[in-house]
Each structure stands twice: as structure tokens, then as C-alpha cells.
Image (cartoon, helix red, strand yellow):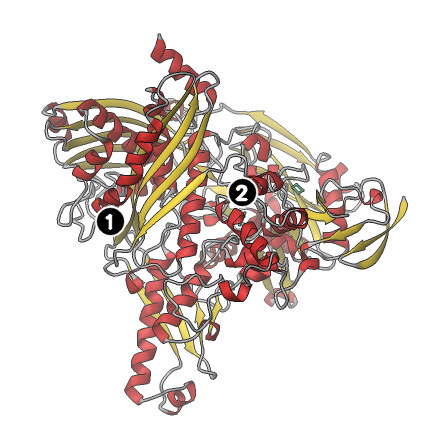
Amino acid sequence: MKKVSLYINGRPVQVVSDDELVLLDLLRDTLGLTGAKQSCDRKGQCGACTVIVNGKAVLSCLTKVASLNGAEVITVEGLGNPDRPHPIQEAFVLAGAVQCGFCTPGMIMAAKALLDQNLDPSADDIKHALRRNLCRCTGYAKIIDAVQLAGRFLRGEITPDAVRPQTDTDAFGVNHPRPPAMSKACGTAQFTGDIRIPGALELAALRSPHPHAKISSIDFSEALEQPGVVGVMTAKDIKGTNRLNYIIPDRPVLCEDRVRYIGDPVAVLAARTRDQAMAALGKIKVEYEMLPVLSEPENAMAEDAFQIHDQWPNLCFSQPQIKGDTAAALNDSHVVIEAHFKTQINHQAPLEPEACAAFFEGDGDDAQLVVIGRSINIHHHLAMLQEAVGWENMRYEEAFSGGQFGIKIEITSEGIAAAAAIHFRHPVRYIPSLVESMQMSSKRHPFDMKVKMGADASNRVTALDMDMVVDNGAYHSNGNIIVNRAILMLSGSYHIPHVHCQSRLVYTNNPWGSAARGAGPPQAHFALECAMDMLAEKLEVDPLEFRQINSLKPGQSKSTGQVVDQWPFPELCDAIRPHFERATRETSGFKDGPIRRGAGLAAGAFGIGGPGDSAIAALELDDDGGVTVYAAAADPGEGTDSMLTQLVAKNMNLPLDKVRLVARDTDRTTATGPAAGSRLTFMVGGALVDAINQLKDSMAEVGANTAEDLRKAEKPVRYIGRKKALDAGPLDPKTGQGASFDSQVHAIQLAEVEVNTKTGEVHVIKMTTACDAGVLINPQNVEGQLQGGMDMGVGYALREQYVADKTKDWMTFKYPSMKTAFDMETILLQTPRNRGPNGAVGVGEMTMVPTAPAVINAIHNACGIWVTELPAVPDKVKAALAEAES
Ligand code: FES
Ligand code: FES
């Protein structure tokens, strides 16, 4: 032990430290300075823990306290607070660099260390200085903008007030800062792991190392004798159904008699500290009896295959789609292409671990169990939890969430924390490691797609045939919805008169699939959009012209048979044309030699307001003339809070600061569906406009100007707005015809890539998207979503893959960084959408859809090869090159 004296944010601190204590733990656990975050199991991979020590940016997770005698430490809390922010904090907020905000404190501290040395850094300087700081949300573009804006503030060229939109300016089309952005930039916003509950037990879960096995016995007697251990919980201790029932009750909170994938939870240990819990976990002894491992859908579909679930067959869902006569149309086509596409299992990779806290408010059987976590669908998840853990009086609170990208359509750590709080009758926190967070959470489904597509001599697509096999992994979650979404959007941006698709969803012993940004269409569009380029090449027609010729038109029908009333896709083709022509010109000189360049296009029409969707939002007129919105519309970083606030301000003609949001608590909100499918603007925004109209009608009817006036006229001050999708669904089970989406967001994207034909490495130089997301409420937020989606899409195209038991941290995952960041350009058209609130639709997933095929098409344009299996890692590129040469 050693006594260490140091200064933290200017204040003297004395601490007795052992050789192991790291600065991050001193800050967070002892001093309550939770601005510094951790994401990478303290491996120095994420940069979220960055602080400044003696003028230099350091990773506090790797900095031993014992080495800090006399040091000056500055954390994000030491820079400023929401009332008196530092100019760098202002710059991050005003530049739109704060989405989920989990990376933000670390980014800001790295930026501060840079700007202290160099007040006018170039983009390359910034990329170098922030190279250790990861962000999943922004694609890094706005972070670079923010650091440069901060430089301008600090050089005195401009003030934050000159940049900041005033709260009483127009609410629409203006980049008003997100309501919680400043608290995230100042490190005061509480994420789940930041919540301190005095005396709470810390949980650790023992997970299966085997993909498929029977649990013969669990012996935890030795674990109970370890220091700090309070108890162990197994499935037998759970009072409810022990099943987390999203659609099918197949996923246990804790495994009962069988494990079905690597990472299935078997037992939970509670201890006084997290370290004690982790240390004792290895003392729980589990005996397994191995079962056949089904890692390929083909094997799982075999007639004599071992059934992974007793009640549900391995082939657990199937949906055909039949429009017209595809076989005849292909037969009559002028050209036909045939290809086999595969996509990988991928992790959504939010930076924040799957943390959860649970505790009782009150005593006895009437006490309310409070669960705090990262859910994007708090009411639905609350109902799942009540049934699973057997406690009725519960409340779910959504903390600030460090990104989710579909992963939080499901609950993970919540089941364990809630059950443990009941079993031990004690407050608990469950802060899983990154490894465990990856193991416990859902993954993007891998698709295997065999495609035939034809066109006639006038360059019109005639038919599409697709055989689609989707690996569901060990549990169903919303697998049928993912498959349906792929089918609902199967014809993409195009008029395809004849479509035949057979889809099959199959249980395996792989990690379980669920929602992941785009959820189904990114996989199916990968095949469709590469096939479009293959056809264009065979027809010897320009791929952009081919897409424009084949655009769906109002009055024509999608693959579902639904006739569309709006389709502003040709205009996007016009908008991207000069960029495509420039890129074609610029890359044309790089078609020989080891370094080749290429330009590729891909498009997408992303459906919003799916069959059967509905939303509810309540609006209350407050006594001061402001209003409060009550709706469980989660904002894990997309900008929902901005959208709702600006929508109300616009339609009520109120300043933004008179609009309040209550969105994160099941006791105070209406259920309004998940923050998924890019649905919140269209659906919840639509419900909110309905509530606004009711309130305005009531006020007009009785001549009221205030809440008091309404009360005197015996009118309510609170109104419930609703929105329902046009189609109730479902698709016809035999033909896949019928129900479809209310509206679409459209995009076409251009990828410019460089391929090193010696190493197989592909580098994206630039991505350009032309996108029409209807009337823009907050252009900066829309652009931020598009940029983040492009960055994620490039990772999906080139690097990222989750391999159970091998992908264990952000290095092995190949997380995007400043080093892999590329130039981005966004072109925004604004066709007001019929039925959209004030003409708007959502945009959160759009650029995830066409990015991967645009990159693959660009690789083909560069060097003539097709990489039809994602990700296009160097080995696959080299193999395709070798095959092309042979
Ligand atoms: S927690 Fe320090 S780098 Fe990730
Ligand atoms: S804003 Fe960077 S990780 Fe979310």
C-alpha cells in the first residue's frame, strides 16, 4: 500500500492505494466522478476513460494510482458543467457530435489535450490525437467538426452564442441542440453503470462454454465460501416462468436443463463487490453432457436433426412471397444472372456494456421492484420481466443508453438483475464485462441467399427469384419479424413485376439473432443491389441509369403487391449523378497496377410504419403555458428527444424550453412501441400531432388560452393521441402479398474505394448518400444518423464479424475508429410524406441498407471481382482475385 497525494480537478485528494488500483476506479467508485466511462474491460481499447494527467491525455483504466503522487488530474467534470460549460463541451453539443454520448467525455478530454498544444489542428491532427477513442454512433465526422469548432471558439474567432440557434427561432429545419446533449458532454448524464446504490450486491453470471449440452449438475458449495459471496441463484430459484417471452417463450433467464449456445447463463453469483463476484464465479462447478452441435441451418433442417427446442421445430418459420410468374419471366428474359450471397453474424456493438440495476421501493409483498437499464421498449420489457421473474408490482426506468442499434429490442441483463433482487431481497447491480455483454446479447442474423434475376432487352428488370435461409441461432426473439421485414422490402427501390422468394428461419446452436440496425433489409438488399450491378454489367448499361429506369413509380406495386402513392427515387438518382460521374472519372485512371480504385452504387427503400404498427402519446397543457409530452419513446442516441420537442414547438408555436418530455419511466408514460425500425418520427410523432390537434381543438372550442381556462370550461388538459399504420397485416402466409409499410425513406449511395490487389485490403475513400427523408425536423440529427449508418455499413461490408468464443473485445471485433474513418457527403431532398407528421419520416437505419452493396459493387468496379460473402476481408478479396486470374 502507498499513500498518494494528487490533485483532481484542482482539489487535493489523498488516497491509500495498492499497486493494482487504477485511476478510473478511483474516479468512478471512490470519488463518484462517473464522467469517465469504460467499455473495453479496461484493455485500453475504447478511450471512453480518457482523462488528462499532467497535461497529457491518458487512459485512466491503465493508469495506476500508485504512480500519480503529485499529479494533476483533470476529468470531464473539471472542465465545466451544464450551467458553465467549457468551449469544447459547447462545441461538441453545437456540432452535433453527441449522439448516445457514451464516448463523449473521453473524446472531449482527448480533444482538450490536443487543443492545449495546437489551437488549430487539421483533420489529420485530430484523427491522430483521438485515434484511441472509439465511437459507434457518429462515423467520426461530426467529432472532427466539433474539435475544429472548439478551436475556433478557443482562438476567439467566433462565440458559442453566435453558433447556437435561439430557442424561439423556427422549430423546424434548425439544428437545435439535443435536450440531454450538454449533460452528456459534461459527464453528468447518468448511464446505468453510473448509478450508485449504497450497499447493492454486485452480480456475476456463469455462462456456458459449450454450444449445446445438458446440465447434469450444478455445485456451488465452494463458491459460497469465497470472500464476500452472499449467495448463488440458479433457475430453480426463479419464481416466475423463467422465460423471456418476446414472441415465443423459448429463452430462459437462467438455463434449466440445457444450454443452447456459448454464453447461455447457468448461474448467478452475488457478492459484496464486483471483483469478489467475478473471483468466486470459477468455484461454481457445472457438469455438462454434450449434445450434437448444429452450427449450420442445413444440418438443423435435416429430417433426423436433433431438435434444439422440444416444443418448436428447428425450421421455426417460413414465409413465401409470390408475385406474378417468376419462372416464366426468367425464361423469357433477355439476360439472367445467378449468384449466391452470404452475410455474417455480426454484433451491433454499442459502446456501453449491458448494465442493469434493480432494487425494491417499499417493503413486503407490496414493494415495487424497480429495474433500471437500457431498454428501448420499456413497457413491453416490463411485461416480459413480470412474467419471467414472477413479480407484479414493477417499474422500468430507462437510464441514458450508450447506443443500441437494435440490440435493446430485447432484454438481457434485466432478467438476471430482477430475479436476483427478488431472490436475495436486496438491491443489486449487474455490470457485465464486454465479453459477457457480447455473449448475452442478440446478433445480426446471417442470411444465405441464392438469387436469380432477369431483365429484358430494353433494360427493364423482369423477375427476381430468391431462396433465403436465415440462421436464427439458439433463440427465436423476433426472428420471424426480421424475415418478414426482408420480404416486405424485397423489391427495394424497383418495379419488379415477377417475384418469387422462399424464406426459412432455422434454429441452430449459434448466437441468437434479433434486431440490428435495419433488421433484415440490409442483408436482403446486399443480394438485390449486387445483383442489380451484375445485371447492368451484362446488359452493358450504366448502373445508375439502370436503377433510374427501373425505379418504382406511384401507381405501381412493390413485391408485396402494395401500390405506392409516393416514390421520390428518380430525383435521388439525379442528385447523385454528378457525384457518380466525378467518381467514375477520378477512379478511371486506377484500373491497372497493384492499387486499383472503383466507384459503386446501391440504393434502398426503407419501409416505415409497418403492418399492425400503432403508437400512443399523451400531451398535457401545463399551468405556465408550456406542455409536457408523456410517451415511452426511447432515445438511445438517435435524437428522439429533439424530434419530439421540435415537433411540439412547431405545432404549438411554443419556444423549445416550454416543451418538457417524460419518456423513460413505465409509471409515467404510455406504451408506444420500440425505438426501432426508424419508426418513432412517423409513428410516435404522428400520435403526438394527433394529441396536439385535440388539445388545440379543445382550446379553440371554448376560447381557452391557458390550462386554467380549460379547467374552468370543464375540458381536460391532457390528451391522448394515436396513430395506426394503414395496414393491419399480416402478409398472406401462402403468397406474401398484402400488408406493407405506410411510407418509405429512400436513398442511393456512392462508394469510392481503393483495393490493394497484393494484400487484398480495401480502403473506403468516400461515401456519398443522397437521401430523401421527408421534411427535415433537425437536419444535423438526420445527417448524424446517415453518417453513423454509413460508418457501420462499411464495417459490415469489410471487417466486422462476431465469432462465438473468438470475438472477445473491440480489437477482435475490428471496431471502426478514426483510422478507418472516411470522407462522407450527404445530399438531402425533402419530399413531404403523405401521412408523416408535418411530412417527416425517420431515417435511423437508412444508410445501413445500401452501404455494403455499394462497397462490394465498387470493389467490382475497381478490379472486376465479386466478393459475395460478407465481410470482404483481405483473404476473400485475394481469393477472388486469384480465381479471376486463373
Ligand atoms: S476503459 Fe480505458 S480504454 Fe477502454
Ligand atoms: S456518440 Fe459516440 S458512441 Fe455514441
711 vs 736, nearest the viewer: 711
- In the rendered structure, the answer to whether residue 681 lies left or right of residue 497 reads right
Quadrant occupied by the C terminus: top left
Q: Which secondary structure lies at badge 2?
A: helix
The residue depicted at 72 percent of the width and 47 percent of the height is: 231
Q: Is residue 844 above or below residue 314?
A: below
Give percent across and percent down for residue 827. Answer: 33, 48
Q: Nearer the viewer, residue 700 or 255?
A: 700
Nearer mark to the viewer, of 2 and 1: 2
In which image quadrant can residue 655 be found? bottom left
Residue 493: image location, x then y, percent: 24, 41
Q: Answer whether labels 2 and 1 touch (C-beta < 8 Å).
A: no
Q: Which residue is mark 2?
A: 123
Point 27% across, 42% down: residue:
489
Q: Residues within 10 Å of mark 2 (few under 14, many from 20)?
A: some
Among the 4 quarters of the image, the one containing residue 322: top left
Q: Position of residue 540 (x, y in %)?
A: 19, 24
Residue type at tag 2: Ala
Secondary structure state at the residue bearing disc 1: loop
What label sits on residue 295 in the rendered view?
Answer: none
Residue 140 position (above or below residue 833): above
Q: Which quadrant of the figure contains the N terminus?
A: top right
Q: Check disc 1 and report the residue beneath it.
A: 740
